[in-house]
Image: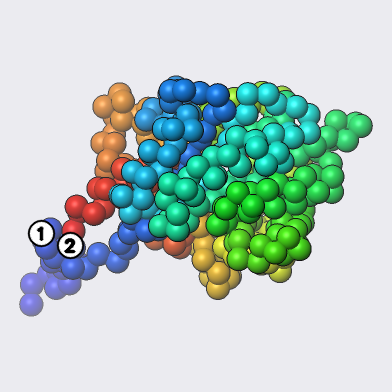
Amino acid sequence: MGFPNVRPRRLRVNPAMRRLVEETKLAPSELVLPMFVKEGLTEPRPITSMPGVVQHSRESLRKAAAEAVRAGVGGLMLFGVPIHKDPEGSGGLDPNGILNVAIRDVISEVGDSTVVMGDLCLDEFTSHGHCGVLDAQGRVDNDATLKAYATMAVAQAEAGVHVVGPSGMMDGQVGAARQALDAAGHQDVGILAYAVKYASAFYGPFREAVESSLEGDRRTYQQNPANFHESLREVKLDVEEGADMVMVKPALTNLDIIHAVRKEVTLPVAAYQISGEYAMVEAAAANGWVDRERAHLETLTSIRRAGAQIILTYWATEAATLLRTRY
Ligand code: PBG
């Protein structure tokens, strides 16, 4: 027998063979589209650092939500941007605040045809840009923030949200949301826990999207990217506190964490391909340095292969459409 007698290339010989042996498939239903809605807008407004992503008006949000549903996406994650921000982030707690109004709009548009989620965090609403309220020394006050999250969770549930996504990295945030929801009779509203969330440079474009005026950083509550075991601890706590799904964020810099979390829990594992991950590919593609569609699908496939069965991505509608015509 001639050398080499083992030939892996045989399984790559043509598209039909490659399709047959492909191990990881992405489905539109596994993609969740994060969406921004800005109070008072009459027309959608582009976000410069995220080409193709906009701050929606209430009207354009409804249309884009319906379009995402037609493309087959599994869910929507809504972020509200108020006109007025204050130190308490009161716009997030107000039943008539922009996020809660938008949840009602989207639910009336799409009903139960997709999973509608709301960001459960104060940073879009606070004048200082932190994810919680501050104490007299200007530090983020964990337990006072939990009270605000509890009120916010119930307001979102009353607006009809299917799932809340606590993303502020306060200790006890999942338990606080669960207790408040249950006490208000919202046992069926789920919790997508941002269980692992690193203090990342890649959130940059999101700051533009929600007009955040954050001074300083979030390192007293978000995790140090150097740490691994801390993530498993965070996940364990969120599972104990009643999380229905656990998320790792950012995605591409943390494929090892996604993989480890997948092995650790029996709940659905999600990953968030964040604004900076999206922006990097868009910027390189705009320069002709990478093929945009291939680069996006490659990142999504890698995140899926690492073990995330749900992926939040700004590319969800477009990717879902591409995937439907792919096979
Ligand atoms: C906090 C929140 C952030 C993102 C999602 N939820 C910002 C942050 O933690 O700094 C970032 C998402 C992205 O960058 O795409 N409400």
Residue 255 in percent (x, y) is at: 49, 54
Residue 129 marker: none
- Work out which quarter of the rendered image holds the C terminus and state it: bottom left
Q: From the Cβ of disc 1, is ligand 1 less than 8 Å away? A: no
Q: Amino acid at mark 2?
A: Arg
Is label 2 in a helix, a strand or a loop? helix
Is label 1 in a helix, a strand or a loop? loop
Q: Amino acid at mark 1?
A: Asn
Q: Which residue is mark 1?
A: 14
Residue 274 in percent (x, y) is at: 50, 41
Above or below residue 306? Residue 207 is: above
Q: Nearer the viewer, residue 144 or 201?
A: 144
Residue 71 in percent (x, y) is at: 30, 49
Q: Nearer the viewer, residue 160 or 168?
A: 160
Above or below residue 98? Residue 316 is: below
Residue at image x 51%, y 66%?
A: 268
Numbered-mark total: 2
- Work out which quarter of the rendered image holds the N terminus and state it: bottom left
Number of residues whose C-alpha sits closer than 10 Å to that of mark 1, classed few (under 14), some (14–19) or many (20 or more): few
Q: Is residue 63 visible?
A: yes
Residue at image x 57%, y 28%?
A: 39
Q: Quick one: which residue is furthest to the front in this view?
A: 108
Gap in Å between the C-alphas at discs 1 and 2? 6 Å
Q: Is residue 175 left or right of residue 300?
A: right
Q: Which residue is mark 2?
A: 18
Q: Is residue 5 left or right of residue 198?
A: left
Quadrant in which residue 326 is drawn:
bottom left
Q: Quick one: which residue is furthest to the right in this view?
A: 136
Quadrant in which residue 204 is drawn:
top right
Residue at image x 43%, y 39%?
A: 62
Mark 2 and mark 1 in contact (Cβ < 8 Å)?
Answer: yes
